[in-house]
Amino acid sequence: LAKAFRAVAPELEPTRKQISDLNTELKKLGIVTAMIMREQGGFTRPAAYIRERGTFTSKGELVYADVPSALNPLPRNAMPNRLGLAEWLVSDDNPLTARVAVNHFWEAIFGHGIVETSEDFGTQGDPPSHPELLDWLATEFMRDGWSMKKIERLMVTSATYRQSSRATPDLISRDPYNKLYARGPRFRVEAEMVHDIALSVSGLLSNKMYGPSVFPYQPQGVWDIPYSDDKWIQSKGEDQHRRAIYTFIRRSAPYPSLVTYDAPSREFCTVRRVRTNTPLQALTSLNDPYFFDAARAMARRMTTQGGSSEADRITYGFRLAVSRRPTQKELEDILTFYRRQLTEHRGSGDASEAAAWTMVANVLLNMDETISKE
């Protein structure tokens, strides 16, 4: 009755006209909609036919939605839908979800998981190096309400994590991959972090959050693809210096400097990245215009904020890069390098000093310690 009244009441005519006009404008936009999923009504367990040899018209056995038989069964009183599956995933009877989650956190913090094959907890994967520790972390994770902040705080405040990463030759020969955790973790950070460290240290990093992807510098020709005429139009202003996570990624032509540092092409899901060491990585961070712009900006920061003496500026730059003061030997080596560069660029006039400090900054940005977690 209310619906019929709203359709004919004279006093609602302006509202009906406004709704009609808005629907007309919406249709003119030409937005394509397609329903891809909806919740089934009732409590019927979802079912589907196996298609013989993948042929849609060849129906085979009717199978019902269920959880893997190797794990604990779905409770009889659970709803046979996505909600029931979600509750099963985080139930106290399911030991797998929490163990996989804490192993990922451990891998991010220590460089490798307690289960090395974090993408495979099955019979084909590696067994845990410390099974009791993995189980304890999983139960603590669940007991604390699945709080990622609490479990990660527990890991980074542990005595194991707070060890020095320095190791004796004997210890390295006995445990080269530190699977026994007799020393603190030390490993090169991921590709996106290498990118962001250069921007942060140089002072170029934009703190802008959210929004569409950006198009920072990349070499010409990367997007020269026969079946597409799309062009890489370089972003302007602070969008050139946003975090790597905002960089536009195309699977057929991924961003070169990120791929060089082992970022995946995103053609398929990559749970665990493999770290490599190749000359291309050093050549990229030494010579790529993106990184060299960061070196120029860092040089300006050293000369304007680092003090008036050469030693003070080097110390300031060193602290920006690796968060510690240089040793006397390191300070002397960098100072010698700076003076040699200053001599080589004397012919550049007033720009000679800026060029020399840029080369110093380039060295600091490329130190192993700068792009390593230790």
Image (cartoon, rainbow, N blue to C red):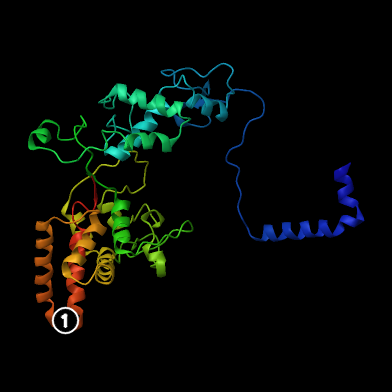
Q: Residue at x 67, y 25 (%)?
A: 42
| Residue 350 x, y percent position in the rendering | 20, 82
Kindly tell me whether residue 126 is visible in this rendering.
Answer: yes
| Residue 123 vs residue 357, the one in the foreground | 357
The image shows residue 367, relative to residue 336, as above or below, that is: above
Determine whether, in the image, residue 212 is placed left or right of residue 156: right
Amino acid type of the residue tagged 1 in the rendering: Ser
Secondary structure of the residue carrying tag 1 is helix
Q: Relative to 26, say whether 236 is above or below.
A: below
In this orientation, does residue 236 appear?
Answer: no
Residue drawn at (53%, 26%), measured in percent from left and top?
Answer: 87
Q: Residue at x 24, y 71 (%)?
A: 303
Q: Where residue 128 sits in the image (x, y, percent)?
A: 28, 25
Q: Does residue 70 appear to the left or right of 179 in the view shown? A: right
Residue furthest right in the image:
10
Give the labeled residue for mark 1. 348
Pick the front one: 90 or 42: 90
Q: Is residue 166 above or below residue 41?
A: below
Task: Quadrant for residue 120, please give it.
Answer: top left
Q: Is residue 328 left or right of residue 291?
A: left
In front here: 49 or 90?
Answer: 90
Nearest the camera: 150 or 131? 150
Q: How many numbered marks, from 0 up? A: 1
Q: Where residue 61 sits: x, y (%)?
A: 51, 20
Percent position of residue 343, x then y: 9, 76
- The quarter of the picture where the C terminus appears is top left
Residue drawn 17% across and 69% down? 310
Of the 4 image quadrants, the one containing the N terminus is top right
Q: Is residue 259 left or right of residue 172?
A: right
| Classed neighbour count for the residue bearing mark 1: other residues with Cα under 10 Å, few (<14), some (14–19), many (≥20) | few
